[in-house]
Image: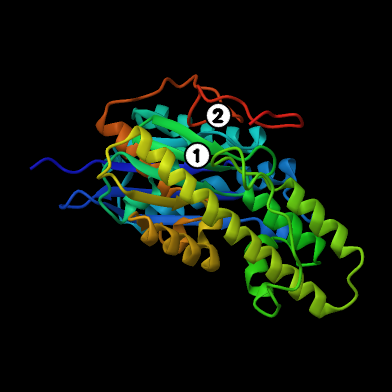
C-alpha cells in the first residue's frame, strides 16, 4: 500500500505564525501530526490592534523556528513530505508574503509541489480535520475579517448566499471590547466579560434584520455601543452593555441563519443539511448554543471545528493543501499574494455606503 501523502502547511496572513503537518489516516480523515501557532498578542497589545509592519517583522523572525519545531514535533523527516502549502490570501500583504515566499523557497529547495491556499477555504474545510463531511454543505464563516454564508459545493466551488455589508462580526466584537476598555485582543474576552451583566439592560439595534436576505450588517450596532459608552457611569453598566451586545449578536445570527437555510435549500438537494460554522468567532459559546438551537429547529446538522482550530492555524491550510494535492492542483513558484482574495469571485461587491440590498 502506497504511503499517504504528508502536507506541510504555512499560515502568516495576519498576526499568527503557524506551521502544521497533516496526513490522512486509514479511514481517510486527516490526522494532525503537528500544529504550532505562535501568536503576537504581546507585540500589538499596547497599540490596541495589529500593526502590519510589526506583524511582518515578527513572522520573519519566527517562521524558520516555528517550521523546525513543527517538523520535529511531527516526527516526520523532510524527505517524507509530499508538498508545501502556504496561505496566499486574503490578509495583510506584508504578512502574507513572508509565509508565501518561505513556502515557495522550501518547495523549490526540496523539489516539491507548491500549493497556494485561500485562507478562507482553510476555515471552510477545517471541520474536515476531524469529521467526514460530504459536499454540498452550508457554511457560516465568522472571523475578524469576514462574515459570510456560503454554499460549499466542492473544493474551490463556492456560492455566496450572504455577506456583511460593512464590518465583520469579529471586528464588531473587537471594537466593542475596546470601547468597554477590555484589553487587546478583546473580542474573545468579551463573552466572559458579558457573563457578569444583564443582557436585557440595553435595547440595541439589529441592522437590516428584516431585509437583505441573509446579508449582515454590524456598523450600526457598533455606533450604538459607542454612543452608550459615552453616558454609562459604572463598571456594572459595562458588564450590562457587553451582555446586551452578546445577546443582540446571537439574535441576529439566529434570524439570518434561518434565512440562509432557506436560501441553501433553494439551490441544493433537500436531503443535504450539514451546517458548518467556522472562523475565530465560532469559538464563542453563546453563539454556538444559539446556532445549534436554530439548526435543530430547522433539521440541519450543526458542525463546528475543534476550539483550537477556530482561530488562524496552519492545520487548516495543510488540509486544503491535501485536498488540492489529491486533485493535482499545483501552483507555479511565481504565484503572487492576493490580500483581497475571495471564495466566490463572481459574487457582487456589497460593502460601503449606499449599498442596495
User: Looking at the image, which residue is at 80% across and 80% down?
Assistant: 236
- Quarter of the figure with the N terminus: top left
Inspect this view and state whether residue 45 appears: no
What residue did someone put label 1 on? 119
Numbered tag placed on residue 133 in the rendering: none
Q: Residues within 10 Å of mark 2 (few under 14, many from 20)?
A: some
Task: Give percent across and percent down for residue 62.
Answer: 58, 49
Q: Nearer the viewer, residue 237 or 57?
A: 237
**Residue 139 drawn above or below residue 334:** below
* In-image side of 336 versus 179 (left or right): left
Q: Residue furthest front?
A: 210
Rendering quarter of residue 110: top left
Numbered tag placed on residue 341 in the rendering: 2
Task: Give percent across and percent down for residue 105.
Answer: 47, 30
User: Looking at the image, which residue is at 45% across and 52% down?
Assistant: 277
Which mark is first along the chain, 2 or 1?
A: 1
Secondary structure beneath disc 1? helix
Determine the CA span between mark 1 and mark 2.
Answer: 9 Å
Q: Residues within 10 Å of mark 1 (few under 14, many from 20)?
A: many
The answer to the question of whether label 1 and label 2 lie on touching residues, with beta carbons closer than 8 A, is yes
Q: Nearer the viewer, residue 203 or 82?
A: 203
User: Looking at the image, which residue is at 48% across and 45% down?
Assistant: 259
Inspect this view and state whether residue 318 appears: yes
**Residue 224 drawn above or below residue 115:** below
* In-image side of 258 versus 248 (left or right): left
Amino acid at each position: 500500500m502506497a504511503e499517504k501523502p504528508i502536507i506541510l502547511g504555512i499560515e502568516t496572513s495576519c498576526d499568527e505564525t503557524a506551521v502544521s503537518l497533516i496526513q490522512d489516516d486509514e479511514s481517510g480523515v486527516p490526522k494532525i501530526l503537528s500544529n504550532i501557532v505562535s501568536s503576537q498578542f504581546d507585540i500589538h497589545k499596547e497599540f490596541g490592534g495589529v500593526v502590519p509592519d510589526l506583524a511582518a517583522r515578527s513572522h520573519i523572525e519566527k517562521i524558520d523556528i516555528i517550521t523546525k519545531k513543527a517538523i520535529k514535533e511531527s516526527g516526520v523527516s523532510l524527505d517524507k513530505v509530499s508538498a508545501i502549502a502556504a496561505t496566499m490570501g486574503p490578509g495583510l500583504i506584508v504578512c502574507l508574503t513572508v509565509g508565501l515566499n518561505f513556502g515557495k523557497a522550501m518547495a523549490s529547495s526540496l523539489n516539491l509541489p507548491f500549493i497556494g491556499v485561500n485562507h478562507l477555504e482553510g476555515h471552510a474545510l477545517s471541520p474536515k480535520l476531524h469529521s467526514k463531511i460530504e459536499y454540498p454543505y452550508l457554511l457560516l464563516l465568522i472571523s475578524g475579517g469576514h462574515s459570510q454564508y456560503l454554499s460549499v459545493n466542492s473544493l474551490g466551488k463556492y456560492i455566496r448566499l450572504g455577506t456583511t455589508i460593512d464590518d465583520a462580526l469579529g471586528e464588531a466584537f473587537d471594537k466593542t471590547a475596546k470601547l468597554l476598555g477590555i484589553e487587546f485582543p478583546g473580542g474573545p474576552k468579551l463573552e466572559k466579560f458579558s457573563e457578569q451583566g444583564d443582557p436585557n439592560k440595553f435595547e440595541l439595534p439589529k441592522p437590516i434584520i428584516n431585509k437583505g436576505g441573509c446579508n449582515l450588517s454590524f456598523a450600526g450596532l457598533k455606533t450604538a455601543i459607542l454612543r452608550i459608552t459615552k453616558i454609562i457611569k459604572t463598571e456594572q453598566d459595562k458588564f450590562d452593555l457587553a451582555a446586551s451586545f452578546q445577546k443582540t449578536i446571537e439574535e441576529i445570527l439566529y434570524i439570518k441563519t434561518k434565512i440562509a437555510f432557506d436560501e441553501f435549500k433553494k439551490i441544493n438537494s433537500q436531503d443535504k443539511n450539514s451546517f458548518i460554522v467556522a472562523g475565530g468567532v465560532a469559538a464563542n459559546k453563546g453563539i454556538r448554543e444559539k446556532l445549534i438551537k436554530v439548526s435543530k429547529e430547522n433539521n440541519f446538522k450543526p458542525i463546528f471545528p475543534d476550539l483550537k482550530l477556530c482561530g488562524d492555524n496552519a492545520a487548516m491550510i495543510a488540509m486544503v493543501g491535501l485536498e488540492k494535492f489529491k486533485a493535482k492542483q499545483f501552483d507555479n513558484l511565481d504565484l503572487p499574494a492576493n490580500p483581497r482574495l475571495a471564495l466566490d469571485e463572481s459574487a457582487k461587491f456589497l460593502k460601503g455606503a449606499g449599498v442596495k440590498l
